[in-house]
Amino acid sequence: MSDPGPEPGDGTKDPSRFPARGAAVLEQMGGISGLIYSSLPVVVFVPVSTAFGLLPAIGAALGVATLILVWRLIRRESVQPAISGFIGVGISALIAYIVGASKGYFLLGIWMSLFWAIVFALSILIRRPAVGYIWGWVNSHDRAWRGLRRAVVAFDLATLVWVLVFTSRFVVQQHLYDANQTGWLGVARIAMGWPLTAVAALVTYLAIRAAQRAVHAHDAAHEAQETGTTADEPGGVAQPDAH
């Protein structure tokens, strides 16, 4: 039985489709430039806070976030990441204002890191690795990997890496928060931001490739078994016995 080829929208049959889908996900995050833009409000907030106080720092961070949004609009780039970033800066600024201290600006990120660490860790414990389900959503809600131990283990490992990333962010930044080290909080936010994300993304990519190989091997074996069964059925083509 010949392979009819991948159906439209089915990214699991063609491994070459993953880079395009991965690029689409990265684009939704704002691309490489979006990851860099997300650090700019922090880069501005910390020195302005040190030199002029909390309110000028809040205004500066919001101003930078607004400029990034306008810049992406002018360049006709995806604005969804910029809007999300602006909202995040706004919430962080509001928390800092309520707390009455510059370090409050980092509370949202600190506690979101803890939240995602718990979510991803629980997904491993219940054998539903978050990375696998995210990949399945990107690939038209494909769940073929769920029945393959190799794929599940690969996604477990990738999810564990993200747990380590989120946990390290929480532990380090919470410690700096408790120590009132606002300047170092800014350094930690940037240093543990997109660099760690890039490392975790690489591990995720390798896990996805391993899972894809497991799925493709399983599909090939299943197809070969079906082909053999068809040949053995009455009416199937069989070679005459030479003896």
Image (spheres, helix red, strand yellow):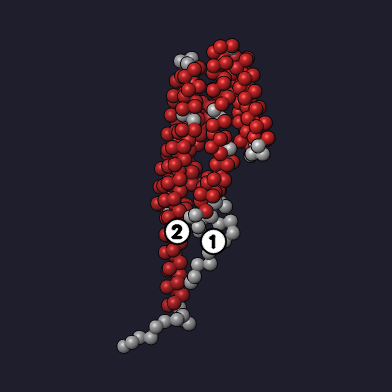
- In the picture, measured across the screen, residue 39 lies left or right of residue 148, that is right
Q: Are marks 2 and 1 in contact (CB under 8 Å)?
A: no
Residue at position x 50%, y 17% in the image: 182
Q: Is residue 118 visible?
A: no
Locate residue 231: give its quadrant.
Answer: bottom left
Q: Which residue is outermost to the left?
A: 243
Q: Quadrant of residue 62?
A: top right
The circle drawn on residue 222 is: none
Taking the spot 44% from the left edge, 24% from the top edge, the residue there is: 172
Report which quarter residue 49 is drawn in: top right
Vertical arrangement, residue 188 with respect to residue 134, above or below: above
Q: Nearer the viewer, residue 57 or 123?
A: 57
Task: Give the side of residue 104 with respect to residue 69, left or right.
Answer: left
Q: Quadrant of the C terminus?
A: bottom left
Extreme-front residue of the structure: 75
Residues 197 and 20: in front is 20
Q: Name the amino acid type tagged 1.
A: Pro
Query: What kind of residue is marked 2?
Result: His
Q: Residues within 10 Å of mark 1 (few under 14, many from 20)?
A: few
Residue 18 located left or right of residue 8? left
Asked whether the viewer can see residue 209, the reply is: yes
**Residue at mark 1:** 6
Query: Who comes first in sequence, dot 2 or dot 1?
Result: 1
Q: Secondary structure at mark 2?
A: helix
Q: Nearer the viewer, residue 183 or 216?
A: 183
Q: Which residue is mark 2?
A: 216
Which residue shows up at 46% across the image and 15% down it? 179
